[in-house]
Image: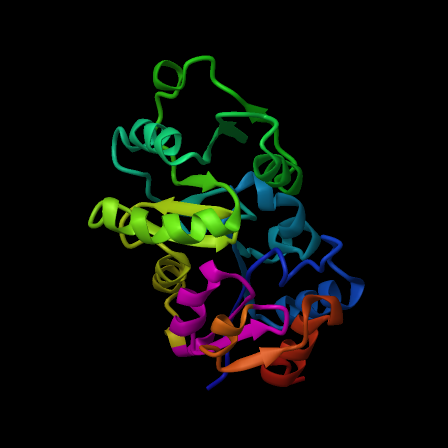
Amino acid sequence: MAYELLVLDVDGTLVNTKKEITDRTRDAILECQEQGIKVAIASGRCTEGIRHQAAAIGLDRYGGYIISFNGGRITNFATGEVIYDISLPAGMLHELYDYSLQEGTGILTYHEGQIVAHSDTDPYIVVDAKGCDIPIWVPEDFHRDVNFAGNKCILTGEPEHLAELEKKAAKDFAGRLSVYRSEGFYLEMMPPGVDKAYGVSKLLERLGYRRTQMVCCGDGFNDLPMIEYAGLGVAMANAPEALKEKADYIAPSCDEDGLVDVIERFIKDW
């Protein structure tokens, strides 16, 4: 069956280790869209944090989609229409702020095109702000000043600490949140049941496609659900071994234009 939808993670997949989209990768993705293949970006980043990459691969010209917040929001990048959006349970950000103090982690969320965080010097939060090209706002009083729900929250810290905390937090918030790491130093706290597989399933409903018509490519822990869900799940060579074991195909690394290989091998038919 021909594939109709190509879904791409950003860091370590669409962009290389220099955080660049190479000309070869960009041109291959543009060719796909010229031939009628729909393309979507699926990322843990906020919507604004993906805007440069989405524009670079022509999602505005070809009606492509941004699946942001690890599946929590879907936006038509050409029109700006938000076609799906889900937030954390009411009051959860305040509870998670207290939890971060208890567990000795940093904390961040997103609101109106900015990162909302406990600190603007936490190195893991600075990395996210730079990658997304958005500012950091540190509320004077988190409980008083944060009066929105938020699509997701991230706890930040040393990978060894978060590896243990992931197990504890999954028990502490069982039935109320989905808990998983996107990077070793980011622990994602999501609305129940929401992950990238959930997000792409909502997009498939919108487009009227079946999962067998979709290729999903990624390299991070948070890409595993969509890689397992897709008709063709692709892990980049730079992905962890646990992810590659679950993939249908292992592409060359992001520094070797791995997406070009995927397109030429599975999608290109002209």
Residue 122 location (% of width, % of height): 58, 32
Residue 221 horizontal/vertical position (percent)? 47, 61
Residue at 38% across, 21% down = 146
Residue that appears at 64% across and 54% down:
61
Question: Is residue 253 shown left or right of residue 87?
Answer: right
Please provide percent x and percent y for residue 55.
66, 49
Residue at the image point whose x is 49% and y is 28% from the top: 117
Image vertical order of residue 60 relative to residue 116, above or below: below
Q: Is residue 253 magenta?
A: no
User: Which residue appears at 54% of the width and 25% of the height?
Assistant: 119
The span picked out in magenta is: 212-239
Q: Residue farthest to the left? A: 175
* Residue 119 visible somewhere in the drawing: yes
- The residue nearer to you, when weighing 51 against 227, is 227
Q: Is residue 214 magenta?
A: yes
Vertical arrangement, residue 62 with respect to residue 115, above or below: below
